Image (tube, grey):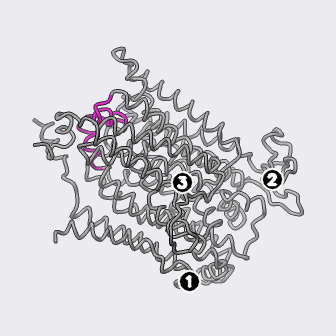
Amino acid sequence: MPQLLIICGYLFLLLLLGVGASRLFRGTSQDYMLASHSIGPFLLLMSIFGTTMTAFALVGSTGESFKEGVGVYGMLASSSGIIHSLCFLLLGVKVWELGKKYEYRTQVQFFRDRLESRWIGAILFPVLVGLVIPYLLIGVMASGTVINKVTAGSIRDGRVVGGTFEEGTFPHFLEQGKNPKSEEPPSFTYGSQGGVPKPLASLAICAIVLIYVFLGGMRGTTWANTFQTLVFMVLGLVTFVVIAWRLGGQESFWASLQMASSSIPVEKLTRIHIPPEKFLTYMFVPLSVGMFPHLFQHWLTARSAESFKLPIVAHPLFIAIVWVPCVLIGAWATSDLITIPPPVAANPNAVLPFLVKQLAGPVLGGLLTAGILAAIMSSLDSQFLCLGTMFTEDVVRPLCGRRSLSDRQQLLVARLFIIGIVALTYGLSLFEPRRVFTLGVWCFSGFSSLFPLIFAALYWPRLTKPGAYACILAAAGSWLWLFRASEFAAQPNFTVNVPVPTTLDGDGYWQLMPVAAMIVCSTVAMVCVSMVTKPPSKATVEKFFPKSSP
Amino acid sequence: MKPAHGVWAFILFLMIAHQDIWFWDDTTLVFGFLPVALAYHACISLAAGFAWYLATRFCWPTDPAPSAQRRENA
């Protein structure tokens, strides 16, 4: 029960923050969506980092390390440290400059101008929203799992002991769950296990985030992101220390660390099961930040281009601070120092909350859970807000034409659309869960396949409207085809296998990440079609490439 | 060589160094607790922070703020 009270207290604090931000709200849609371009370096760093590090970073990285070993850090974290900052420098600063100059609020507005295409939104908007939904799904699913696991009891002799709630407290369909590896009927042991049922917990988190986003808009979201980023970084380190000490069981922290790590099985210490070419092509996944619509919106909130310097430098360091402990914890969970029960081992998303529940006391466990939820919510809020902005700016306003909406009507429309998408995502989260990491990689891969579009729009004057359409269609088509081939993320280790004469591991194939194939498709389509179609007008080239024009 | 070229060369070097096939099956624990595959990539992250610091010093795109400010004032 203390864990639940602490979680409720934390959520209440967030609501207060939303109310505080709403008192500074200037009442305009510009302020609601972009905080009137007033965000300085520190808030920009925290909001960008908090937005980028979602459930994927804490829950997902621990779970993936538990399954695949410490190579997970190199696959995504260290590469993100290089690629994310590259995108902030090459794309973020330029987008901010153009956004401020021409008053863009969304990606579609920028592309509409750059490509001289009024209808680019008709194809880009559904693709972007379609890709944000799995991203949202990660947070919604993980929040439910985390709250459930820390409030659940433990299983002894096939029975649940010490849960927060007795069996029968909630309706049957909320409490019963099915063992994915057997044909047995649903049971309490594989269901809520005496904790807050996952669907209920996810619903509560969605509601809280919706309320503070609606109250505070972009300013409230930025404040909440900063607060939550600080919370999850500090509490993440505390979690690491507590788990290391309790798991190692030695007198000193250092000795406990060494004991815990020396118990990691050899296959989790190395990358012998990861093909080097798969590791290499993982490097394309972080390119996704270049096309995240919510990050695009955060870039536009910056007060000046100088505000980007701190995020660019500190981002790789912050990634190390968050990911190294999580990956180590996941690897420790595979050792013989702790027994992971089958229901937890079957769902890697549950490994971190399970360890917190087992190894920290109830009060500390509650605080640490708040930290994990902070990481999850700091991404959900930006995504919610961005969806509303995109719908208002890219769909409603162009459709209304001269019958322009008042600011109040725009806010209402944005909020209704956000509620609709959240309801859809919540509905999807009730189906069979996927590994957070796998789902995240698919979602990021989709955005990465659109990276050539934003890069060319900013640096290649020859990019044409048909070239851009070809790029989007090729990206969406290849993503859908490969996602279906992976049985909708049910195959966590799905790769595109290219037969070659020789390989390092001698299996006769290069096992490439699907993202590599998608980027090749979208780039080839974009370049080929652009080269054979009419170049953009001189006025457009001069507008976006002032130095390159004659 | 201009400093900016050196910075971009350093970033390219980091991308290549990221593919550390030489540590693929190494089970060494650095300081007795940090698997070498993790320790090496944590160092890549630190080096990336330094590289991007240099990039903000020597490869920074022109800041449009002053001219925009002047236009606004005018």
For disc 3, the marked residue is A441
Q: Say which amino acid is labelled 3.
A: Val
Asked which secondary structure carries label 1, the reply is strand
Residue A367 falls inside the magenta stretch: no
Question: Can you tell which of label 1 and label 3 is closer to the viewer?
Answer: 3
Q: Position of residue A347 (x, y in %)?
A: 70, 57
The residue carrying pointer 2 sits among few (fewer than 14), some (14 to 19) or many (20 or more) residues within 10 Å by Cα, namely some
Q: Residue at x 44, y 64 (%)?
A: A79
Q: CA separation, marks 1 and 2?
A: 37 Å
Numbered disc total: 3
User: What's the magenta region?
Assistant: A93-117
Q: Does A225 sit above or below residue A465?
A: below
Q: Position of residue A263 (x, y in %)?
A: 67, 80
The overriding secondary structure of the stretch rendered in magenta is: helix
Q: CA separation, marks 1 and 3?
A: 29 Å
Q: Position of residue A370 (x, y in %)?
A: 60, 54
Q: Is residue A205 left or right of residue A194?
A: left
For disc 1, the marked residue is B29
Q: Is residue A538 left or right of residue A524?
A: left
For disc 2, the marked residue is A179
Q: Does B68 sit above or below residue A360?
A: above
The residue carrying pointer 1 sits among few (fewer than 14), some (14 to 19) or many (20 or more) residues within 10 Å by Cα, namely some
Q: Is residue B11 left or right of residue A67?
A: left
Q: Residue at x 69, y 41 (%)?
A: A430
Asked which secondary structure carries label 2, the reply is loop
